Amino acid sequence: MDTARDLLASISGRGTSRRSLLKVAAGSAAVAGAGAVGLGAASPAAADEATGYDAIVIGAGFAGVTAARELQSKGLRTLLVEARNRIGGRTWTSTFLGKQVEFGGTWIDEIQVNVWREAQRYNIPIVSDTDPMDRAIYPAPQGVATYTPDEVFAREATLLGKVMEGTEGFFPRPYEPFFNAAGLIEPDKLSLRDRLDQLRLSAEDDRWVSAITGGYSGGSSTYGAYTMLAHWWALSGRTYGGFMGVNVDRPAPGMKGLLQAMLDDARLSGLKLSTPVSRIENTNAGVQITTRAGQRISAKVAVVALPVNVWKNINFGSAGLPSEFLALSKEGMAVQSAQKIYMQLRGQNIGRFVAQAPEGYKLVSMLSQHILPDGQIAVGFSADPTLDGNNLEQVRAAVRELDPTLEVVSVKAQHWGRDEFSLGGWTFRRPGQLTTKLRAVQQPVGRLTFATSDIATGWAGFVDGAVESGFRAAQQALALTKQVAA
Ligand SMILES: Cc1cc2nc3c(=O)[nH]c(=O)nc-3n(C[C@H](O)[C@H](O)[C@H](O)COP(=O)(O)OP(=O)(O)OC[C@H]3O[C@@H](n4cnc5c(N)ncnc54)[C@H](O)[C@@H]3O)c2cc1C
């Protein structure tokens, strides 16, 4: 067993099927419209705006594009409005040193049925990140130490297994998270830190496993809910291999290629980029949005496909937003200081490596991505609010905490928390959010329905959850238009 990925594949037992699927997908590769944003055959006629659209979808991430495509396919003239000059939201396929990189969501997996179905529908080829790892930098009693990948993954599997022991009853049906609602009330009050404390691990084991739980939950295990990790664990088949295996496969043309294929297929009645929405008026007569530039556009219904963390900054008009929505937005669901940092590294015998930092370090984790003739590109994740991932000196200091021999030559980062159109990165629910708020915010409010991975029923925090929520919100919006017509 010489690679971390092989270890994962053997634990999960899914390596062979993934490779077979890869062959099928690659053989039929025909990526639809992976270039600039387009509208397929449709053209947004000015007359449409005068007469009003049937539906407006606000936000062109995976949730919004899914919802818009579904509504248009049901015969509703649909306008998609996006603040940025690109689609994709918290996925962002770009380049670093000439290589294709992802500044946000990257990996998808066949067990994530919503997004996987989309990749297959549009014949998107899949590539697998299975390159052998040479070494692993993980917590030691003091600081960090270098281990073999086999050592660290075996230990991580054992420790995460302990953390998840006894969670089998929480989500007996992972896509129906409230199937055992009564059994969730007490555990949902616990943070991951509370759970680790229950286990009374040795100081060294605690330091190890909290490196992982703290990383997911925003820099400290005290932020994230125990039930959030338990939900991902249940969705992954309750094995370490299944859990880690969702970070292996990715669309070859990037997330952008997949989303562009979905958008092209949607043939929407209208698409507006670089158009931030500042106000959403929601009355019995219909919905009217106001853009930051002052343009007003009306429709029968609207899908709010915005991250939960930004809801609080939108003016929801005279009706406002119900209190649960506002409270959730103020608490925040996505990790507020999440950053993804690409780095050009040099150093002697760096090798391919994976690093997981103890809680309190500037970087949560690091991973080799591309070997270059004179070094490599690695990606780092951070949830430290004081780190500026675009500041070379700061990143150098952060990397030195993990391996002082690594020389950082250049950096390029995306700080999702400082981006006004996301105000956070990946979703990780806080204690209590699942049982006290999730169901409420999945419901329509007047003529509005809500879509985003943050409030998905299944894979919240993943692209799969965004697609799932887009389908749900579109169905709800369609039902609302039927009520209006009746
Ligand atoms: C660093 C990082 C790594 C990740 N890794 C993975 C991974 O490997 N695999 C995975 O599946 N998931 C991953 N995720 C999570 C995944 O990227 C997200 O869950 C998913 O992309 C969210 O989609 P969404 O449509 O719900 O929201 P978003 O993508 O945030 O879309 C919302 C859209 O609304 C727009 N918007 C905001 N405000 C306004 C406004 N006022 N007016 C108009 N439009 C507005 C935004 O610009 C954006 O386009 C990662 C996320 C991050 C940040």
Image (cartoon, helix red, strand yellow):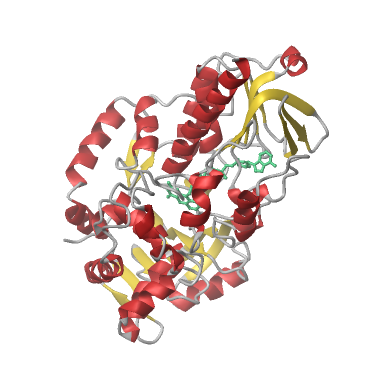
Ligand 1 image position (quadrant): top right
Q: Is residue 372 visible?
A: no
> Where the N terminus falls, by quadrant?
bottom left
Q: Which residue is painted at 20% across and 36% down in the image? A: 20
Could you tell whether 237 is left or right of 337 in the image? left
| Location of residue 192 in the rendering, given as x and y in whole percent from the top left corner | 42, 69
Q: Which residue is painted at 68% across and 17% down in the image? A: 44
Which residue is more in the foreground, 225 or 402?
A: 225
| Location of residue 291 in the rendering, given as x and y in whole percent from the top left corner | 77, 35
Q: Which residue is painted at 64% across and 26% down in the image? A: 301
Could you tell whether 128 is left or right of 220 in the image? left
Q: In the figure, residue 374 lies in which quadrant?
A: bottom left
> Where the C terminus falls, by quadrant?
top right
Count of all numbered marks drawn on residues in the image: 0
Q: In the figure, residue 147 lies in which quadrant?
A: bottom left
Q: Which residue is painted at 23% across and 69% down in the image? A: 158
**Furthest-right residue in this view:** 294
Q: Is residue 352 visible?
A: yes
Which residue is more in the foreground, 281 or 208?
A: 281
| Location of residue 221 in the rendering, given as x and y in whole percent from the top left corner | 45, 71
Q: In the figure, residue 303 lies in which quadrant?
A: top right
Which residue is more in the foreground, 250 or 285?
A: 285
Vertical side of 427 occupied by 264: above or below? above
| Location of residue 285 in the rendering, given as x and y in whole percent from the top left corner | 73, 24
